[in-house]
Image: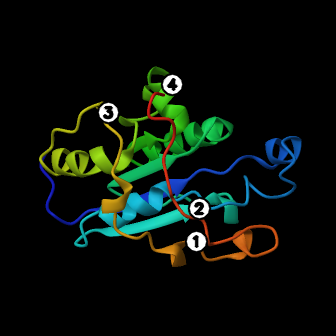
Amino acid sequence: MKWGDFLKIILIQAGTEEKISKEMGFGNRNRINMPMLGLLYIEAITPRDMEIEVIDETHGLIKEFEKADIVGISGMTVHANRMYFLAEEYRKLGCYVVLGGIHVSFMQEEALRHADTVMVGEGELIWPQFIDDFKNGVPRRVYQAMQPTDIQGLPAPKRRLLAGDAYKMPAGTLNSIAATRGCPRG
């Protein structure tokens, strides 16, 4: 099946269940109080002719699920169970689910049990190819970045998408920056 140019996309930074948050010392928050910028960069490189929504579960866990053409979910290992739960809920609605983030990069076979596609490595390098493949009806199961992203060439993320109480000082900050990414030998 081929898609038109217009797609509805939801990107979700997974949170954690309240019990896990408290056990890890996060209090009632759904994760650490520093904004994760990965999905904001993905949003920034997504073609402007698509409807795109970014949801950060730090502000509260999603309780109602809406249909979209593509749902992209990211998180760390602490978010894995929540990511998989979200993936299954959106798949029940008939959404195409893409999982990414550090946990998925190391546990891609596990993640593939819950998603239509997984992204391994830095998403900015592989997201545009996925979108093209999806629109042409030939998305792959796995996309893998083969090199690090040159962050100097990335468009600025829309920090307004992080609005809400979760990142207000003194508990957190909207002023996070990406100065480098991971270990180049990792």
**Circles 1 and 2 in contact, beta carbons < 8 Å:** yes
Name the residue type under label 2: Asp
Judged left or right of residue 178, residue 154 is: left
Can you identify the residue that label 4 sits on?
107
Instruction: Report the front residue among 85 and 159.
Output: 159
Can you identify the residue that label 3 sits on?
144
- Which numbered disc flags the more N-terminal residue, 2 or 3? 2
Q: How is the image coloured?
A: rainbow
Name the residue type under label 3: Gln
**Circles 3 and 1 in contact, beta carbons < 8 Å:** no
Q: Name the mark on residue 56.
A: 2
Q: Name the mark on residue 162.
A: 1
Local crowd size for mark 4, using a 10 Å CA cut-off: few (<14), some (14–19), many (≥20)? some
Secondary element at image label 3: strand
Name the residue type under label 4: Met
Local crowd size for mark 1, using a 10 Å CA cut-off: few (<14), some (14–19), many (≥20)? many
Instruction: Report the front residue among 46 and 68.
Output: 46
State the CA–CA distance, disc 3 to disc 4.
13 Å
State the CA–CA distance, disc 2 to disc 3.
24 Å
- Which numbered disc flags the more N-terminal residue, 3 or 1? 3
State the CA–CA distance, disc 3 to disc 1.
27 Å
Secondary element at image label 4: loop
- Note whether 170 is above or below 138 in the view shown: below
- Which numbered disc flags the more N-terminal residue, 3 or 4? 4
Name the residue type under label 1: Leu
